[in-house]
Image (cartoon, rainbow, N blue to C red):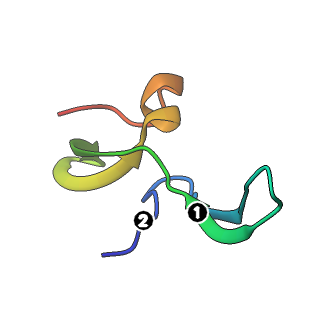
Amino acid sequence: MAQVCDICGKKPQFGHNISHAHNVSNRRWNVNLRPVRARVGTSTKRMRVCTNCLKSGKVQKA
């Protein structure tokens, strides 16, 4: 399942782990998603929303 916020479209970011010996390996920073029953128009819908959208009030819980 894709790690994407249904509201803002935020996705994982990619980068590198770099050790003290400068060994480089790939890593990714995942989005902090929460399953939420949100109010969309007049109905409720299950969505995966990042915590940033929940805190900012872009989503109204049902």
The mark found on residue 9 in the picture is: none
| Above or below: residue 17 compared with residue 62 | below
Q: Nearer the viewer, residue 48 or 14?
A: 14
| Above or below: residue 19 compared with residue 16 | above
Q: CA distance from mark 1 to mark 2?
A: 11 Å
The mark found on residue 3 in the picture is: 2
Q: Residue at x 31, y 54 (%)?
A: 48
- Residue found at the very far right of the displayed protein: 22
Identify which amino acid the numbered label 1 is placed on.
Arg
| Above or below: residue 2 compared with residue 45 | below
Q: How many numbered marks are there?
A: 2
| Quadrant for the C terminus in the image | top left
Q: Residues within 10 Å of mark 1 (few under 14, many from 20)?
A: few
The image quadrant that residue 29 belongs to is: bottom right
SS under mark 2: loop
> Of tags 1 and 2, which is closer to the observer?
1
Q: Residue at x 75, y 69 (%)?
A: 24
The image quadrant that residue 60 belongs to is: top left
Q: Nearer the viewer, residue 43 or 33?
A: 33
Q: Which residue is mark 1?
A: 28
The picture places residue 30, in percent across and down from the top left corner, at 50, 55
Q: Residue at x 43, y 44 (%)?
A: 32
- Residue found at the very far front of the displayed protein: 21
Q: Nearer the viewer, residue 42 or 10?
A: 10
The picture places residue 59, in percent across and down from the top left corner, at 39, 36
The picture places residue 44, in percent across and down from the top left corner, at 16, 48
| Above or below: residue 35 compared with residue 61 | below
Which of pointers 1 and 2 lies earlier in the amino acid sequence?
A: 2
Identify which amino acid the numbered label 2 is placed on.
Gln
Q: Residues within 10 Å of mark 2 (few under 14, many from 20)?
A: some
| Quadrant for the N terminus in the image | bottom left
SS under mark 1: strand
